[in-house]
Image (spheres, rainbow, N blue to C red):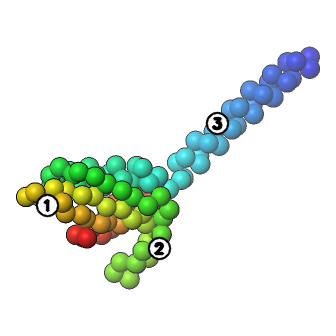
Amino acid sequence: MKKTNMIIAAGVGFAAGYLAKQQVDTMQKMTPEKALKQAKEAFKKEGPINGSWIYMKPEQFEKNGLLYEAYRGGVTRNIDGKNIQYEFHLDADTGAIIESREA
């Protein structure tokens, strides 16, 4: 009887842990990797890119009087034989590009 109770308890514990992880994942901010992937896809609509980077730690960013928790990153493009760099800020919650400018 003790083995059965232990197996049931382990199963219930596993199920509770799995459900808790699912809830945390849905409430978690966008990862820097996913945010960079979204930004690269947006920049690729205007042409090919050569390289990209992103800071892994979100930072406070103010735009038009609004304060965002944002990732900072950049991409490099080769236009007419010259490497041109662009920097951007992405909303850490949604991955939306808040600002983009040539560096």
The secondary structure type at the circle numbered 1 is strand
Q: Contact (CB < 8 A) between labels 2 and 1?
A: no
In the rendered image, which quarter contains the C terminus? bottom left
Q: Which residue is mark 2?
A: 60
Q: Earlier in the sequence, mark 2 or mark 1?
A: 2
**Alpha-carbon span between mark 2 and mark 3:** 32 Å
**Alpha-carbon span between mark 2 and mark 1:** 32 Å
Q: Position of residue 71 (x, y in %)?
A: 42, 63
Residue 91 visible? The answer is no
**Alpha-carbon span between mark 3 and mark 1:** 50 Å
Q: Earlier in the sequence, mark 3 or mark 1?
A: 3
Instruction: Tell me, for residue 18, which label it has, or none.
Output: 3
| 93 and 83: which is toward the camera | 83
The secondary structure type at the circle numbered 3 is helix
Q: Nearer the viewer, mark 2 or mark 1?
A: 1
In the visual, does 77 lie left or right of 62? left
Residue at position x 75%, y 31% in the image: 12
Q: Nearer the viewer, mark 2 or mark 3?
A: 2
| 11 and 100: which is toward the camera | 100
Q: Contact (CB < 8 A) between labels 3 and 1?
A: no
| 62 and 18: which is toward the camera | 62
Q: Amino acid at mark 3?
A: Tyr
Q: Amino acid at mark 1?
A: Lys
Q: Position of residue 45 (x, y in %)?
A: 17, 51
Does residue 76 lie above or below 66 as drawn?
A: above
Q: Which residue is mark 1?
A: 82
Residue at position x 48%, y 64% in the image: 58
- Density class for disc 1 (Cα within 10 Å; few <14, some 14-19, many ≥20) is few
Instruction: Tell me, for residue 51, which label it has, or none.
Output: none
Quadrant of the image occupied by residue 20: top right
